[in-house]
Image (cartoon, helix red, strand yellow):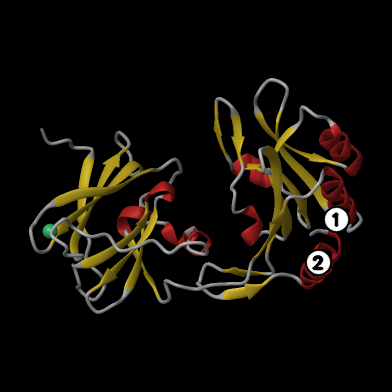
Amino acid sequence: MLDERKIQKEIVSSIGEDEFQIRYIRDENAGILISRSDKSYFILDSKEYWYDLIQEKHPSKQKCSCKNDFFKVRFDYLRRKETDDFISVELVSQCTECGKTKTFGRIDIDYSPSSQLFEQAITYCEQPKIKYKTYTIGGFWEKEDLSGLTEFLSQKQLLIYLWYWNEFGKRCFKQVDFVELTMFLSNENSTYLGIYFSFEPLEQIASNSDYDDKGIFIDRNLWRKKELVQIGSPIRVLLDNSIKLCYYIEFCCEFIDSNGKVQVKGESFCCLTKELLRYCKEKLK
Ligand SMILES: [Zn+2]
């Protein structure tokens, strides 16, 4: 039965190419198409996330079971009843050799308006691979090492935010001061998901975040674009028959803007990161 809320769009580039290789990150619903003439295009709104996601791992090209890796691509849009908005888009590929079709992605759309995702289904991408310098510093620190680090950061006039599990088993996000943070960390039962030392207020982040019945989700890549230092929740590792905590912090002085250009963050933040690197080198082994 033909669903009248469904619209299909065969993907053709602005210069008329309609066969592509596909690099798609399924968990994050972001990807690019690469044409026969080696031009790359972001799928839907992937441009927003792509560069942050590929810093750790570049997704490999999809291959058909017949070994071919070029496909015709079609997006199936599902319209919200009697509106120009879409609920979801299904990404369908058809092998140019054997004709086999496959749904390689399904994206739910939770914002409005979304008609631009139909009008501009793909966006030209000049450079699909851009790397920028990031820092992840970690190790099997003691609790004192963590409190030393938070004390060092708290002296830098930064706003402190905590993403944590509350006593009712919900994920919460709030601004705290150094005393509250110290009290939280000294409590054996406290569990945090992230601690953020930020140059800028993050209240806006909370209102734009996703929620489920267990509370709020904060984007794990917050530190990439924002001027902040992120302390991740420690990873439990079994070492020599005992559980050790592996702590880590993440930050960077560069980011990639919406035009795909590497930009440097503000001078004061960059100075702070230099001091932080020095601190880590001296105090944290
Ligand atoms: Zn095939």
Q: Amino acid at mark 2?
A: Lys
Q: Nearer the viewer, residue 109 or 31?
A: 31
Q: Is residue 283 above or below residue 104?
A: below
Residue 224, image quadrant: bottom right
Q: Secondary structure at mark 2?
A: helix
Residue 210, image quadrant: top right
Q: Nearer the viewer, residue 203 or 169?
A: 169
Question: Mark 2 = which residue?
Answer: 281
| Picture residue at 65% right of the left edge, 26% below the top | 170
**Does the numbered disc 1 mark a residue whose Cβ is under 8 Å from ligand 1?**
no
Q: Secondary structure at mark 1?
A: helix
Q: Nearer the viewer, residue 248 or 178?
A: 248
Work out whether mark 2 precedes mark 1 in sequence or the reverse, and give the earlier one: 1
Q: Nearer the viewer, mark 2 or mark 1?
A: 2
Question: Mark 1 = which residue?
Answer: 153
| Picture residue at 24% right of the left edge, 79% below the top | 37
Q: Is residue 35 above or below residue 245?
A: below
View quadrant of ligand 1:
bottom left
How many marks overall?
Answer: 2
